[in-house]
Image (cartoon, grey):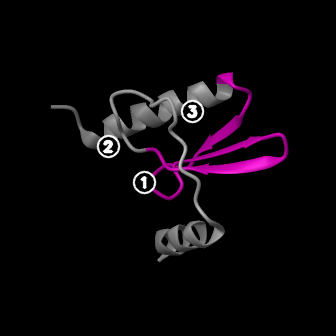
C-alpha cells in the first residue's frame, strides 16, 4: 500500500509542474501546512491547497474568501 503522505507529495508535485508549464512561479510549503503551494503570475498570488485525487480535474479551482483564507492560516499556525 502506498504511504498517503508520499501519494500527496507526488500529487502536489504534479500540480506544481502543471502550473509551472502555464507560466506560474510555484513554491511548495511542505510539512502538511496550509497552503500546500504558493503560485504567482501577473502580479497575483495564489494559495493552493491540493486534495489528492487520481487525476487533476478540469475545473480544480475553489476560490476562498479573504475570511476563509485568514481562518485557514490562523488554524495552520495555532
Say whether residue 69 is left or right of residue 5. Answer: right
Q: Nearer the viewer, residue 4 or 52?
A: 52
Q: Earlier in the sequence, mark 1 or mark 2?
A: 2
Residue at image mark 1: 32
Q: Secondary structure at mark 2?
A: helix
Give x and y (percent) for residue 18: 58, 25
Q: Residue furthest front?
A: 59
Say whether residue 23 is left or right of residue 33. Answer: right
Q: Where does the N terminus fall, quadrant-wise?
A: top left
Residue at x-position 60% and y-position 73%: 67
Give x and y (percent) for residue 60: 50, 38
- Quick check: is 52 in the magenta stretch? no
Magenta span: 21-50
**Number of numbered markers:** 3
- Marks 2 and 1: in contact by CB < 8 Å? yes
Q: Residue furthest left?
A: 1
Residue 5: assigned label: 2
Q: Is residue 59 above or below residue 34?
A: above
Residue 16: assigned label: 3
Mark 2 or 3: the one toward you: 3
How many angstroms separate mark 1 from mark 3 (CA)?
15 Å
Q: Residues within 10 Å of mark 1 (few under 14, many from 20)?
A: few
Give x and y (percent) for residue 54: 33, 28
Q: Residue furthest top?
A: 21
Give x and y (percent) for residue 4: 27, 41
Amino acid at each position: 500500500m502506498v504511504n498517503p503522505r508520499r501519494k500527496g507529495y507526488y500529487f502536489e508535485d504534479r500540480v506544481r509542474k502543471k502550473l509551472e508549464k502555464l507560466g506560474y512561479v510555484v513554491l511548495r510549503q511542505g510539512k502538511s501546512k496550509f497552503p500546500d503551494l504558493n503560485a504567482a503570475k501577473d502580479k497575483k498570488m495564489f494559495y493552493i491547497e491540493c486534495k489528492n485525487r487520481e487525476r487533476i480535474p478540469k475545473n480544480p479551482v475553489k476560490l476562498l474568501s479573504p475570511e476563509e483564507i485568514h481562518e485557514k492560516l490562523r488554524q495552520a499556525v495555532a
